[in-house]
Amino acid sequence: MQVTPLEIGFGAVIEGMDLRQVDSSTAALLRASLLEYGLLVIRGQSLTPQEQVAATNLFGQPEVFPVVRGQLSSWPEIFRVASQPADGHVEVGRYWHSDGSFRENPTPISFWYSVMQSEEGGDTLFTDLQQAYAELQPDIKEEFDTLRTAHRNGVVHPLVLRHPKTGERALYLNMGLTAGVLGYSPEQSRAVMEAVDRHYSRSGASYRHHWLPGDVVVADNLHVAHKATPLPASARRILNRTTVRADGVIWHEAQQAA
């Protein structure tokens, strides 16, 4: 297994890896790499739904989802993101967000497997939430450190979230599901959200992943956020996404594994 950091400053490419055949020491190295880099890119995989769920278990217990049109009835752990309604959920996440932020205990890890891809469009953008916080001006940090945001379902999170394993601070905000900032007027809330949105999108802060069939991307949702980009209307693409439960995540670093 070879780990090569991405030039953007976060994330890493993992080579020499078959996710169908991972021993305990390699699994520990994967988890340590995810903690360090926040994002793992593993190309050239060939996973059945069962094998994807097994690979997700390397990071913890998967969440399950209701089975609806386009989803896999035998695999409720897999949430299908697609360009066509018959294949899965469409028009998903075209704004900066971390998966599962609407939960009381946010979803810590997402795992995507590329089943089918269009040659054009559909790239996913990723940005480093910890670096986003680090680059704030001191007076903005002081303000943001005190703020809490409310999702539309009433779930409240601090705007500056500490990673449960590393303790690192991250600027944590879902642009599509957040109703506002507690104690702020709608206008003030909108101003904060628009400022964070611009900050996430600042020049040089995003990694753009162009999907190829067989790609796997694993994200620490408490370290990075992501954003989908449009596809041509005629395109057909499918991403199988699994996510890890907050109460079942495995954060152990390599040296802690037996």
Image: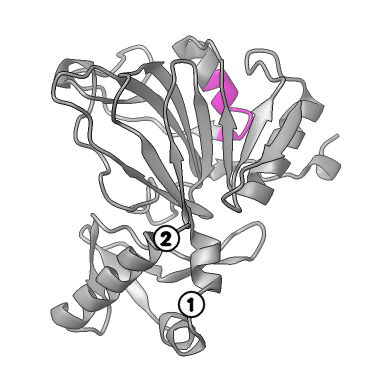
Position of residue 145 relative to residue 194, above or below, is below
Image location (x, y in percent) of residue 165: 65, 56
Position of residue 223 relative to residue 184, above or below, is above
Q: Is 57 inside the magenta-drawn segment? A: yes
Name the residue tied to disc 2: 203
**CA separation in Å, label 1 and label 2:** 14 Å
Q: Secondary structure at mark 2?
A: loop
Left/right placement of residue 118 relative to residue 256 reads left
Mark 1 or mark 2: which is in front? 2
Residue at (34, 18) in percent of width and height: 117
Image location (x, y in percent) of residue 71: 27, 19
Rendered image quadrant of residue 39 = top right
- Name the amino acid type tagged 1: Leu
Name the residue tied to disc 1: 136
Q: Quadrant of the C terminus?
A: top right
Position of residue 252 relative to residue 231, above or below, is below
Task: Tell me if I can see residue 181 in this picture.
Answer: yes
Residue at (24, 22) in percent of width and height: 88
Image location (x, y in percent) of residue 103: 36, 52
What is the span of residues highlighted in magenta in the rendered image? 53-60
The front one of 67 and 207 is 207
Residue at (37, 53) in percent of width and height: 101
Residue at (69, 20) in percent of width and height: 17
Rendered image quadrant of residue 65 = top left
For the rendered model, the colour scheme is one colour
The front one of 203 and 174 is 203
- Among numbered discs 1 and 2, the one appearing first in the sequence: 1
Left/right placement of residue 205 relative to residue 175 reads right
Rendered image quadrant of residue 140 = bottom left
Q: Is 167 inside the magenta-drawn segment? A: no
The front one of 232 and 89 is 232
Image location (x, y in percent) of residue 163: 58, 60
